[in-house]
Image: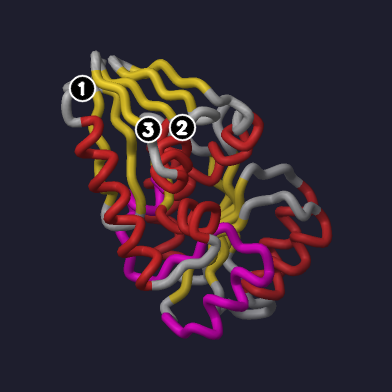
């Protein structure tokens, strides 16, 4: 059964194109052209995720998100906006947004983010998993031990947490901001560079397994690709 998306976008041409793109990628999309119509659709139907433009007539995306969260606080929301203002981004996250994307954007990146958010709930259910056998590696996150072929490594705490997140998201998009908030507890330039260093360390540890590769996805996150 396809996941249902509520897309609220007042630019009808852009909204129609985005709806078609998401439909082609196996989502069931309902398009509303203003905040009031969006709220009506949300109250009358069930959706797995919402995508709201911020600047809209009748009811803006932030107000719509507040109303939606009062009805169902667990509904994931992605904001779309032409404005890249820090205050807007902070307000979006304070309202419980799962992501905030500035126009123009790569539709493929949006698709990755949607899939990652939808997967997150199922991933959270599996977070207690401690051991992973993937391709030619065996990873025990409780003991922080990684075996690649005949080689064994003791991981640092951050290497361990980062590899566990990648394993939980294997073959799917792992958002950079998710890892930063979960492992580094903050998201800024310095923690992002630190994360890149740890990704490089993990790539070096996994290089002897040709069936695994950590791929950079548009600079927005990573994917542990299992080739076997």
Judged from the image, the secondary structure of the residue bearing numbered disc 3 is strand
Whole-percent x, y for residue 76 in the image: 63, 52
Between marks 1 and 2 in the image, the one whose residue lies nearer the viewer: 2
Q: Residue at x 71, y 54 (%)?
A: 41
- Whichever of labels 1 and 2 marks the residue nearer the N terminus, that label is 2
Front-most of residues 158 and 86: 158
Q: Pointer 2: what residue?
A: 144
Question: For the N terminus, which image quadrant?
Answer: top right
Residue 154: which disc? 3
Give residue 4's quadrant in the image: top right
- Per the model, the C-alpha gap separating discs 2 and 3 is 6 Å
Q: Residue at the location (34% across, 61% down)?
A: 194
Name the residue nearer the viewer: 133 or 27. 133
How many labels were placed on the picture? 3
Q: Is residue 215 left or right of residue 47?
A: left
Q: Secondary structure at mark 2?
A: loop
The answer to whether the residue labelled 3 contacts the one labelled 1, judged by CB atoms less than 8 Å apart, is no
Place residue 36 in its image quadrant.
Answer: bottom right
In the displayed structure, would residue 6 be above or below residue 142?
below
Sequence-first tag of 2 and 3: 2
Q: CA distance from mark 3 to mark 1?
A: 17 Å
**Which numbered tag is attached to residue 209?**
1
Magenta-colored stretch includes residue 85: yes
Residue 28 position within the rendered picture, expressed as x and y whole percent measured from the top left: 54, 39
Range shown magenta: 84-112
Residue 138, horizontal then vertical, whole percent: 38, 18
Name the residue: 49% across, 83% down: 86
Instruction: Using the image, tell me which numbered label, if any, was put on residue 44.
Output: none
Separation of disc 1 and disc 2 at Cα? 19 Å
Q: In the structure shown, which secondary structural element does the residue marked by tag 1 occupy?
A: loop
Q: Residue furthest right?
A: 71
On screen, residue 7 above or below 125: below
């Amino acid at each position: 059964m396809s996941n249902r998306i509520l897309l609220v976008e007042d630019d009808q041409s852009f909204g129609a194109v985005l709806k078609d793109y998401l439909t082609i990628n196996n989502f069931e999309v309902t398009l509303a052209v203003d905040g009031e119509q969006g709220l009506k659709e949300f109250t009358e139907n069930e959706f797995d995720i919402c995508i709201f433009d911020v600047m809209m007539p009748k009811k803006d995306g932030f107000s719509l998100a507040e109303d939606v969260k009062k009805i169902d606080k667990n509904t994931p929301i992605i904001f779309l906006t032409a404005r890249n203002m820090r205050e807007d981004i902070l307000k979006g996250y304070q309202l419980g947004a799962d992501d905030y994307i500035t126009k123009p954007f790569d539709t493929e990146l949006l698709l990755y983010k949607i899939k990652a958010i939808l997967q997150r709930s199922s991933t959270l259910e599996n977070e207690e998993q401690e051991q992973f056998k993937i391709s030619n590696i065996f990873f025990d996150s409780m003991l922080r031990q990684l075996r690649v072929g005949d080689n064994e490594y003791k991981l640092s705490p951050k290497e361990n947490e980062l590899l566990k997140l990648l394993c939980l998201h294997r073959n799917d998009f792992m958002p950079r901001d998710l890892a930063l908030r979960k492992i580094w507890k903050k998201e800024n330039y310095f923690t992002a560079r630190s994360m890149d260093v740890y990704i490089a360390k993990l790539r070096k540890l996994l290089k002897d397994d040709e069936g695994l590769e950590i791929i950079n996805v548009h600079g927005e996150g990573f994917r542990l690709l299992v080739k076997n």
